[in-house]
Amino acid sequence: MPTTLKALVTGATGYLGGRLVPELIRAGHDVRVMVRDPLRIEAQAWSGDVEVAKADATNAPSVRAALEGVDVAYYLLHSIATGDDFARTELDMATTFVCACEDAGVSRVVYLGGLTPADESLSPHLGSRHAVGRLFVDSDVPAAYLRAAMVIGSGSASFEMLRYLTERLPVMVTPRWVDNLIQPIAVRDVLGYLVGCAALAPEVNRSFDIGGPDTLTYRDMMQQYATISGLPRRRIIPVPVLSPTLSSHWVGLITPVPGALARPLVESLKHKVVCEEDDIKQHLPDPAEGLLGFTDAVRLALSKVQNLQVPTRWSSASTAGAPSEPMPSDPDWAGGDVYLDEREREVDASPHALWRIIEEIGGENGWYSFPLAWRIRGWLDRLSGGPGLRRGRRNPRDLVVGDVLDWWRVEAAEDGRFLRLRAEMRLPGLAWLELEVGSDEGGTTTFRQRALFHPRGLLGHAYWWAVWPFHGIVFGSMQRNIANAAEALATDPEADLRV
């Protein structure tokens, strides 16, 4: 195989895709990314080193165009938690993709799925992943179908579940699956295998089990995590009555991972997921320093979290079921109504001070407006299947397009001037929040704040008018407190401004 290949990466705005792209670039390959929204790529450090193909995985012509001239295609898409029919959606998308690969003359497809035990009835999540993997292997394009169990890395959904359950619950009642054997693997090693698969010999067309050197139970992993984190030993009491549905609701309440995503992950833990073969070693060498064990993988992940070096998180991908429509240039589009709440005030602080407060909003810094009210609204959103406030933010001091910010996602950001957030909470409509810093020649700093809501149906209109009386309290106090915080920052740069 040539040393330099043209590689297409799908899911480049997601957890693994966003980490795979720079690894492929470092390996000397030419990389093209396939995304629905090119704006989400612009903030990446590697954006200038890749081609960007705008395409929707459900649209065959756009996928075919994105694959033109590609040697190896990485398929990292899924429709987990998009509804009861997510398995059909995943198979349809994969079928569209593999047909386009065959038509474009792609030399290899690389797909990452889940470890599946033999002779067992699979969970819907694992069953869907396996069906997609078999589809690729059975196609006319040589495929490498990697099968991994739990991926341990900073920001992964599996790691966040483990981390928050262990840290927040010194005593826990758990399902029986805590004693099932699992062979976790560090995200660093998953990426190494993915990159290596680009240069597999053309005749290699099969699945490979990949895992780290340790096989443990989930109970073992929680206890080892507690030891690494300096926590007392956890008291874990397994009971037979917790179904995957009940367990996922419990995980959704305790961890940042919402129930809709937690359920398929929990269902997967019902199985013993241990590698049945290690044939990958016949084709790809292990890293020179060896595969990371569970303890070292956890230590590395925690160091990344503590040093604010988490490049992607499980929430990097769009939330299942969340609105993705960008703000139109004409808010009153298609003849629909758009409700506005607009506010403006002068701030006795520099534009820089005001922007610093705006850019650091949310997460642990709060929303500068009745913390209890925001928490209650967040709890209600989680109970209805939304993300609530627990997703936090990737970095406490920096925001880029595509970043998650509690129940918002950054849709537009102009450094020092403008921030637009799109709501991903459960709403009968589409909602945005805009925060803008202005200044004039006289040195006056202006803070403009605008909330927009496009209702869907009668319920959407009723929702707006039901919450409208509270806007003066919520949005008015938010603008006032942000302005006050900027003014305090101007006089005391070390002030604690969290609300």
Image (spheres, rainbow, N blue to C red):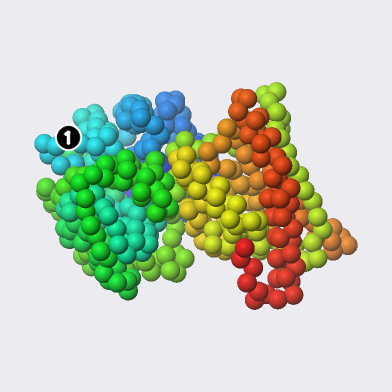
Q: Residue furthest right?
A: 442
Look at 36% across and 49% down and name the residue there: 250
Q: Is residue 227 shown left or right of residue 446?
A: left
Does residue 61 lie above or below 118 as drawn? above
Which quadrant: the C terminus? bottom right
Depicted 136 relative to depicted 360: above or below: above
Residue 102 percent location from the top left of the image: 31, 28
Q: Residue at x 29, y 68 (%)?
A: 226
Q: Quadrant of residue 350?
A: bottom right
Left or right of residue 477, residue 102 in this image: left
Question: Is residue 483 in sight in this rendering?
Answer: yes
Q: Amino acid at mark 1?
A: Ser
At mark 1, the secondary structure is loop
Given residues 180 and 50, the one toward you in this image is 180
Q: Badge 1 is on which residue?
A: 121
Q: Nearer the viewer, residue 374 or 287?
A: 374
Residue 32 position within the rendered picture, expressed as x and y whole percent measured from the top left: 43, 43
Rendered image quadrant of residue 459: top right
Q: Position of residue 410 (x, y in %)?
A: 58, 48
Which residue is at the front of the view, 39 or 122?
Answer: 122
